Image: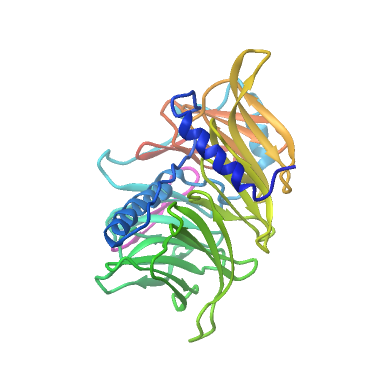
Amino acid sequence: MSEIYDFEKIKRAKERRRNNSGNDMASGGEQLRGKKAKGINRRLRKLVSALVVLFVLCIILVCGFIANKSTLKLDVPAFLSSLADHAKGLNAESGSVIQADSDEWVKYCPYKNYIIQCKSGEVSYYDINLNSIHTNSINMRNPVAKSSEKYLAVGEIEGKEINLFLDKNKAANISYDTSERKIVNFDVAENGYVTVVTDSIKGNNDVFLYDETGEEMSNIHYDSEFVLEAKYNIKDKQIYINRLDTSKGEANTVIDVFLPGKKEEQAEHKRSIGNLPGVFPFWSFTESGGVYCYSEEAFLGFDKKGEGKWSFSFSSGVYGCCIIGQKTPVVVQSEYDETAGKYYVAVNIYNPSGELKKTYKHDGDIKSVFSIEDLVCLNTGYEVLFIGADGELRGRADCEREIKKVLTVRNNTVLFEVSNGIVKG
């Protein structure tokens, strides 16, 4: 059984990381190194704000589905059947390719049955066979997209506008006319509610909640704390805000929970989860309405009341964490086999209470970890291994170009994101 709220253990793990920085540590995975904050005056706060904004960009533009629910439905039986022969895999050479210029801004996002391509001035829709279906014009130079089951939100980090789409049609527009405000981050819920974090030239953060028509529902103001991201939880209909607390001389994480106000009423603060040692940029909701978050030093899960469900801390060798099926926590880390006298990659699969149930062992390095529906995806660079919740290898898919991530698996087809493009397996 995992230890709940064992923050001293996490702090000790952080200390071991500092003392053993020269020791072996497995590479890869989506990782973040929390930065020390020695009290923040106005000048230092601006610097921290800029650095966190850059990091948020990295999360959005590189990490992709780190434990978020995929919006494209996976035909698991057909997929497993198509990948039954592990030795053959799927070769990208036989498929189609979408390729942008190396210096062109281009980002991809799965949405419903489409793959969304964001480029300067446009949002394009492609089907699973990479056929162009539709294009919408937008007034953004560097757009990024986030999707939910029904809605697609396209915005520009450090910009002033977000477009909300329902299928291929624009449903709402959210914009900030003032030159004093810029977008730090945004998210879209399954019901179309959009949460937006903004930053002002004074260094203040505001969290806005909009409904599916673009009407403002709530505005939560922070004077000194820096907000990483906000999400709307459709299970309990509340706003969750991931922010940094630097009041104790370190950057720790607090997740505030607010009930949106009605009409002109202020949002009501319901509770806070924290202080969590370090910065936890990777987070989302579980099937039951709870919340989970992780960094390279810890992986924490909470129920819908904010009570701890699991807590894992890492001293070294963690590749990444994810949730499969919105309920099963997975930790992928380096472990030592004393009998063989070497390290291996352990995919440890737990139940929702944090008890270890299954382990899959991989002999080799991996670049990143993410999940699609009920599968753990281990990206080795030029091949992806698909691991089921039972700890069994379900299939492989390879590519002649280096893989950034798997965008989706549908109709027996794997779509890889590669450098400035998509490859169909």
The vertical placement of 339 against 320, above or below, is above
Direction from residue 163 to residue 298 in the image, left or right: right
Can you give x and y, in whole percent of width and height, for residue 174 in the image? 38, 71
Residue 5 is situated, as x and y percent measured from the top left of the image, at 65, 50
Q: What residue span does the magenta drawing correspond to?
A: 124-139
Which residue is located at x 73 percent, y 34 percent?
358
User: Nearest the camera: 216 or 300?
Assistant: 300
- Quadrant assignment for the N terminus: top right
Q: Nearer the viewer, residue 300 or 352?
A: 300
Q: Residue at x 50, y 74 (%)?
A: 211
Between residue 203 and residue 178, name the one nearer to us: 203
- The single residue placed furthest to the bottom in the displayed view is 264
293 to 211, vertically: above or below: above
Left or right position of 125 against 342? left
Q: Position of residue 254 (x, y in %)?
A: 52, 59
- 126 magenta-colored: yes
Q: Which quadrant of the structure image shows residue 101? A: top left
Q: Position of residue 209 (x, y in %)?
A: 47, 72
Q: For residue 249: magenta?
A: no
